Image (cartoon, grey):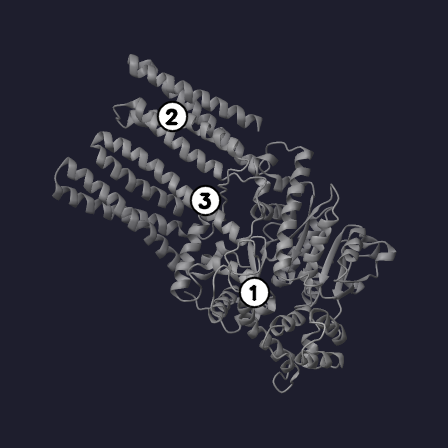
């Protein structure tokens, strides 16, 4: 930090000296001043280049010192953000309404665990507990020797719910200096390419919790927290990875965890195969699995959530469950997912729960579960009408037709599911909006769209500018001819550039722009002052080389505008330590703001340069027109070729998908509403279907074609 401040001071002083030299040059016409001006500008540029290089090293955690107090402060901020995130998510998922489902958990078979002495003290080895007594589960977890736990279970058995409960409870009892539990989807981790779990975890923290990159924490607290093992990774969904990837993750965890703790969820069969393929269990980890809900336990839970005197139609359901047996209804209600489906779809006016016990209507558990999934979307859409109140987390912002919601979610499920992995599993459970184009569009469609989006504005901008210029210099006929020729050439050049850079457009990661002034005013003024001091000498050189008669005026105008624009853009990319966790919609909005800001910034800067030079060379009206058009083109090229551009790739993908009637044009606002309805869940910046089986149910009818 000290080196960067020193370099900024050198750069600013050199810029100020350059201004003085330029003024003296105009007044005295001394040729030695030109050499001095060049040296001053070179010093300013060199200082800025070294400063940018050091900032790059700092961002990678290779430079800059962070004190233990800073790390502790960052951990407290992370704990606050994670707590707010999962308090909201638990409310949307109704995990505590009125109490968690009482799933009983017990230790798994010894062959799935490490040696008992590596896991826990003797009294904690054979353990059992209940999901509705999460404080007891968390207390047992904290007594484990290495605080490592694997949560197994079949689909819909409550693995993810238990992980969420543990995150919330561990945060509630967390003491100063203890790691912060952070729940992430493990399916996005390529352990073969990145075998260190802490490096991968740092990247996920940087994306999902941008406040950790605030200057208050040295700009890279996400790396410091993982380096000091101040994060407890809670990795959900190991079973959603292909078999070789599961084994690679298990090996990478054993190799890189060190003294760190871990919570990992996986289906039982998939974990059993993973430890066989890896030839090793997870070192020092306890392994637990759930017991199926008995019919009587399911009936008791329904009684607790129904009115004191249940309607007669519900009494049929309760009697069927209380009688025990292996009826389709009892088998569906043996998992938390099935019990939740029964309650959610039937606890509403006009429903007939008694029909669920009719074996003639629903002869198998699979048929009954499919019926309940079919009813889920219409019931939740009807139960949660839209509202304009931003504080209401449980109601969407817009009114949706249930058929449209089902169709769009079905297409989304198909996109996530197909093509399936080699072992027949869905391709992924995670919807990553910045990968939408890569996952849905053919390479030809990506290139064509990117090329057309850039080449047409390029041809128009440069063609009109050239036509105006040569019309003023010569005549209208020559100006039109020259404009057509320049438009054709620039269209081909810009189109070719966009064509070959289109692949990168769909691989870009999202960026961040924070336009809030709260607590960041001094940083904004400092950034603006620094960029203006650097921009003025550059403006003087450009004005001098461009033949601007009033070099000082041109340099000041350019320097002020360039400095203010670039300074504001640089400031906006720096997050605040008081920020919020990166929900999918928040990450999308932040990247959109950054792309638009980058586009507008470069457009304004280029427009100013062209406007000044061409205005003085030809006339002021042409300068303004040429500046606006060239600036527009420059902004478009910046957005499509350089910098952060994930939002542009998303725009291209949603254009084609909406054109094919597979997804809505305003996709992210729709997904936010689906999340509020309880049909999707958010895990950091990713969306997932509320349950994996719900995705499978919808995807069965929506296998996408390749556009």
Q: Nearer the viewer, residue 8 or 189?
A: 8
Quadrant where the image shows the C terminus: bottom left
For marks 1 and 2, the one nearer the N-term is 2
Q: Nearer the viewer, residue 1 or 47?
A: 1
Mark 3 closeness class: few <14, some 14–19, many ≥20 residues within 10 Å: many
Task: Pinpoint residue 564: horizontal percent, then vertical percent.
Answer: 41, 32
Q: Is residue 73 above or below residue 87?
A: above
Q: Is residue 424 visible?
A: no
Tally of numbered tags: 3
What mark, if any, has residue 536 been given in the picture? 2
Q: Is disc 3 placed on a helix, strand or loop?
A: helix
Which mark lies nearer to you, 3 or 1? Answer: 1
For marks 3 and 1, the one nearer the N-term is 3
Quadrant where the image shows the N terminus: top right
Query: Residue at coordinates 44% horizontally, 50% vertically from top-left?
Result: 504
Q: Residue furthest bottom?
A: 360
Q: Are marks 1 and 2 in contact (CB under 8 Å)?
A: no
Task: State the residue position of label 1.
Answer: 679
Query: Residue at coordinates 24% horizontally, 47% vertically from top-left?
Result: 487
Would residue 700 appear left or right of 41 to someone viewing this image?
right
Q: Is residue 339 above or below residue 673?
A: below
Task: Pinpoint residue 270: horizontal percent, then vertical percent.
Answer: 67, 65
Q: Nearer the viewer, residue 122 or 140?
A: 140
Q: Is residue 265 visible?
A: yes
Task: State the residue position of label 3.
Answer: 594
Image quadrant assignment for residue 566? top left
Mark 1 closeness class: few <14, some 14–19, many ≥20 residues within 10 Å: many
For marks 3 and 2, the one nearer the N-term is 2
């Amino acid at each position: 930090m000290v080196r960067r401040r020193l370099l900024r001071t050198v750069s600013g002083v050199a810029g100020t000296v350059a201004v003085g030299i330029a003024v003296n040059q105009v007044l005295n016409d001394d040729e030695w001043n030109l050499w001095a001006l060049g040296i001053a500008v070179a010093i300013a540029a060199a200082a800025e280049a070294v400063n940018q290089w050091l900032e790059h090293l700092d961002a990678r955690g290779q430079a800059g010192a962070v004190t233990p107090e800073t790390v502790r402060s960052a951990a407290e901020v992370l704990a606050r953000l994670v707590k707010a995130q999962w308090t909201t998510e638990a409310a949307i998922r109704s995990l505590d309404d009125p109490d968690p489902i009482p799933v009983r958990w017990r230790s798994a078979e010894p062959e799935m665990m490490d040696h008992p002495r590596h896991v826990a003290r003797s009294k904690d080895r054979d353990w059992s507990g209940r999901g509705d007594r999460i404080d007891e589960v968390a207390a047992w977890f904290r007594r484990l020797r290495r605080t490592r736990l694997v949560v197994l279970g079949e689909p819909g058995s409550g693995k993810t719910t238990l992980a969420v409960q543990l995150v919330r409870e561990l945060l509630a009892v967390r003491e100063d200096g203890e790691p912060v539990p952070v729940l992430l989807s493990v399916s996005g981790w390529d352990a073969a390419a990145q075998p260190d779990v802490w490096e991968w975890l740092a990247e996920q923290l940087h994306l999902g919790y941008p406040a950790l990159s605030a200057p208050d924490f040295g700009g890279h607290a996400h790396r410091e927290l993982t380096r000091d093992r101040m994060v407890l990774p809670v990795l959900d969904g190991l079973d959603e990875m292909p078999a070789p990837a599961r084994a690679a993750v298990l090996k990478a965890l054993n190799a890189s965890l060190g003294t760190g703790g871990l919570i990992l969820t996986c289906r039982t069969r998939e974990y059993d195969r993973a430890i066989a393929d890896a030839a090793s269990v997870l070192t020092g980890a306890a392994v637990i699995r759930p017991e199926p809900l008995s019919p009587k336990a399911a009936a008791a839970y329904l009684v607790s959530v129904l009115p004191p005197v249940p309607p007669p139609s519900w009494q049929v359901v309760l009697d069927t469950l209380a009688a025990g047996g292996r009826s389709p209804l009892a088998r569906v209600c043996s998992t938390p997912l099935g019990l939740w489906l029964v309650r959610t779809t039937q606890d509403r006016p006009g429903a007939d729960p008694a029909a669920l016990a009719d074996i003639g209507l629903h002869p198998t558990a699979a048929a009954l579960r499919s019926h309940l999934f079919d009813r889920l979307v219409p019931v939740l859409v009807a139960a949660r009408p839209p509202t304009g109140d931003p504080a209401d987390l449980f109601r969407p912002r817009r009114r949706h037709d249930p058929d449209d919601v089902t169709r769009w979610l079905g297409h989304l499920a198909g996109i996530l599911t197909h093509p399936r992995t080699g072992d027949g599993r869905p391709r992924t459970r995670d919807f990553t909006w910045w990968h939408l184009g890569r996952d849905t569009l053919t390479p030809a469609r990506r290139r064509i769209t990117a090329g057309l989006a850039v080449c047409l504005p390029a041809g128009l901008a440069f063609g009109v500018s050239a036509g105006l210029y040569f019309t003023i210099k010569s005549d209208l006929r020559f100006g039109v001819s020259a404009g057509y020729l320049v438009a054709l050439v620039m269209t081909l050049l810009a189109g070719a550039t966009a064509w070959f850079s289109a692949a990168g457009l769909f691989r870009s990661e999202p960026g961040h722009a924070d336009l809030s002034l709260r607590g960041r005013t001094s940083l904004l003024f400092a950034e603006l002052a620094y960029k203006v001091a650097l921009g003025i000498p550059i403006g003087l050189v450009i004005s001098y080389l461009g033949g601007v008669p009033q070099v000082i005026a041109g340099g000041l105008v350019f320097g002020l505008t360039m400095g203010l624009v670039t300074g504001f853009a640089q400031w906006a990319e720096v997050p605040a330590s008081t920020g919020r966790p990166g929900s999918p919609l928040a990450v999308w909005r932040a990247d959109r703001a950054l792309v638009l800001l980058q586009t507008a910034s470069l457009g304004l800067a280029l427009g100013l340069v062209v406007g000044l030079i061409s205005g003085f060379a030809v006339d002021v009206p042409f300068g303004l027109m040429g500046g606006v058009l060239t600036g527009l083109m420059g902004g478009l090229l910046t957005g499509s070729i350089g910098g952060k551009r994930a939002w542009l790739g998303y725009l291209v993908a949603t254009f084609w998908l909406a054109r094919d009637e597979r997804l809505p044009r305003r996709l992210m606002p729709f997904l936010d509403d689906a999340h509020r309805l309880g049909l999707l869940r958010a895990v950091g910046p990713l969306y997932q279907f509320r349950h994996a089986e719900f995705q499978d149910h919808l995807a069965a009818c929506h296998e996408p074609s390749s556009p």
